[in-house]
Image (cartoon, grey):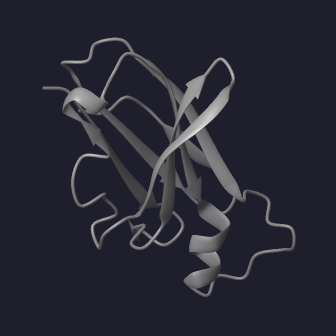
Amino acid sequence: MGKLTTHVLDTANGCPAAGMAVRLYRLEADGPKWLRSLHLNGDGRADGPVLEGAALTAGRYRLVFELAAYFRARGDMLPEPAFLDEVPLDFGIADETSHYHVPLLASPWSYSTYRGS
């Protein structure tokens, strides 16, 4: 069975992004369809797969990471408005039986991602 997982590392502070809020959407012809919201655990990961089994179907998805709220909750001083507020990552799932891991490396000023394992 396939699954979708995520992991966020706070590169500004050198730690997992514990407590960061994340939302998942399926991108459909009539607009994004909200699937779920979650907060990352102490390791900067969801407690389990974000999506798995029959719920993981081929198509386009969006993970939205609430960067500014996370950094402000840590006590980091950010300008208003923050340079990066929410970071949406759009990606495709082609093989419903595969593991899709979407990691994010983030600071208040930059981010990067890749298909992890």
Residue 52 x, y percent position in the rendering = 23, 36
Quarter placement of the N terminus: top left
Q: Residue furthest right?
A: 80
Quadrant of residue 56 within the rendered picture: top left
Task: Tell whether 93 sits left or right of 83.
Answer: left
Q: Would you place residue 89 above or below residue 72 in this image? A: above
Residue toward you, 28 or 94: 28
- At x 50%, y 64%, the residue is 21
- At x 37%, y 15%, the residue is 58
Q: Would you place residue 58 above or below residue 35 in this image? A: above
Q: Would you place residue 115 above or below residue 88 in this image? A: above
Label tally: 0
Quarter placement of the C terminus: top left
Task: Tell whether 78 sits left or right of 2.
Answer: right
Residue 31 x, y percent position in the rendering = 68, 28
Quadrant of residue 79 within the rendered picture: bottom right
